[in-house]
Image (spheres, rainbow, N blue to C red):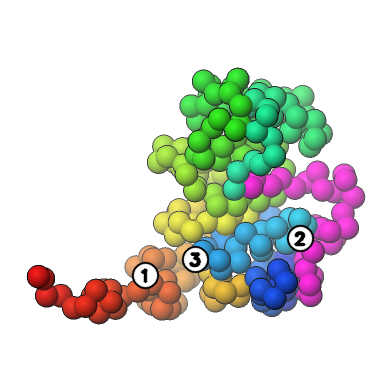
């Protein structure tokens, strides 16, 4: 149920790609000023859930609500409160990084200081030398950096980041965590999909463990550790049976004897 403290909610949402059920009766909340994580294995429905929350997909059933409105029916002015960082920016390989930033700024109606803000972050993330390179020439990690910077630098009330640290080097991951905390400290929210459990545990106030399009567990990292009597979220995965045990690995390899 939506509360006055929530910027975003999904209530009993389902979504299918033809005969494939990607999201099944899924509910979640993103409170104002909080970082919420979606974690789960490949094909669990994280990216689809993110797109439903952002209004990029329309639920088959259930209700998505952003700031009291259906995100699929928001006005342009209200949609300007959202920012979305996809896995990689696609369809713009013919633009240089600088051209893409200016295009994105115009598309989003960003403020006059937006481009300068992206350039400062890009410098911290060691993208200075790529300013005049075409997006199509960049490796996956650097395209990820461009996607995240252009979205996060908008400083919108809520930012969605898909596959948050996929392809990023360790120093950029640390810088990303610092940037998210800084933006959160200014009262903004994040909904982040990631497969990296350690990253989610460090960064998120609340995490949703999604398996087969359903929420299997939810809560703060400390709550989940306590509930499942695990030392960390990796341990929670093991406790609920979504990670193979050493015994299962040994059995799959045919026992412990060596040839």
Q: Residue at x 79, y 72 (%)?
A: 60
| Picture quadrant of residue 31 | bottom right
Crowding near the residue tagged with mark 1, few <14, some 14–19, many ≥20 C-alpha atoms within 10 Å: some
**Figure quadrant of the N terminus:** bottom right
Against 125, residue 78 (above or below) is below
Q: Which of pointers 1 and 3 lies earlier in the amino acid sequence?
A: 3
65 in magenta: yes
**Figure quadrant of the C terminus:** bottom left
Against 35, residue 178 (above or below) is above
Q: Which of pointers 2 and 3 lies earlier in the amino acid sequence?
A: 3
Crowding near the residue tagged with mark 2, few <14, some 14–19, many ≥20 C-alpha atoms within 10 Å: some
Q: Residue at x 53, y 69 (%)?
A: 209
Q: Out of 253 and 158, give the one closest to the viewer.
A: 253
| Residue 253 percent location from the top left of the image | 24, 74
| Picture quadrant of residue 91 | top right
Residue matched to label 3:
41
Residue matched to label 2:
57
Residue lying at the far front of the rendered structure: 259
Label drawn at residue 235? 1
Instruction: Tell me the CA gap for discs 1 and 2.
Output: 33 Å
Instruction: Tell me the CA gap for discs 2 and 3.
Output: 21 Å
Foreground mark, 1 or 3, reads 3
Element carrying mark 3:
loop
Residue lying at the far left of the rendered structure: 259
């Amino acid at each position: 149920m939506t509360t006055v403290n929530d910027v975003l909610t999904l209530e009993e949402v389902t979504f299918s790609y033809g005969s494939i059920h990607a999201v099944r009766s899924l509910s979640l909340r993103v409170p104002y000023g909080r970082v919420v994580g979606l974690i789960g294995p490949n094909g669990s429905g994280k990216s689809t859930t993110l797109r439903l929350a952002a209004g990029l997909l329309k639920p088959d059933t259930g209700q998505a609500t952003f700031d009291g409105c259906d995100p699929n029916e928001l006005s342009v002015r209200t949609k300007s409160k959202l920012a979305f960082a996809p896995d990689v920016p696609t369809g713009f390989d013919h633009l240089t990084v600088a051209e893409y930033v200016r295009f994105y700024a115009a598309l989003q109606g960003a403020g006059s200081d937006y481009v300068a803000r992206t350039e400062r972050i890009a410098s911290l993330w060691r993208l200075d030398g790529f300013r005049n390179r075409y997006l199509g020439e960049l490796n996956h990690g650097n395209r990820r950096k461009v996607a995240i910077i252009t979205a996060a630098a908008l400083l919108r009330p809520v930012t969605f980041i898909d596959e948050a640290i996929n392809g990023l080097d360790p120093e950029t991951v640390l810088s990303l965590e610092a940037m998210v905390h800084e933006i959160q400290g200014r009262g903004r929210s994040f909904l982040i999909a990631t497969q990296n459990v350690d990253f989610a545990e460090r960064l998120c106030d609340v995490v949703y463990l999604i398996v087969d399009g359903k929420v299997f567990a939810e809560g703060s990292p400390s709550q989940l550790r306590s509930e499942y009597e695990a030392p960390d979220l990796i341990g929670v995965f093991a406790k609920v049976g979504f990670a193979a045990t050493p015994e299962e690995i040994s059995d799959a390899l045919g026992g412990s004897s060596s040839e």
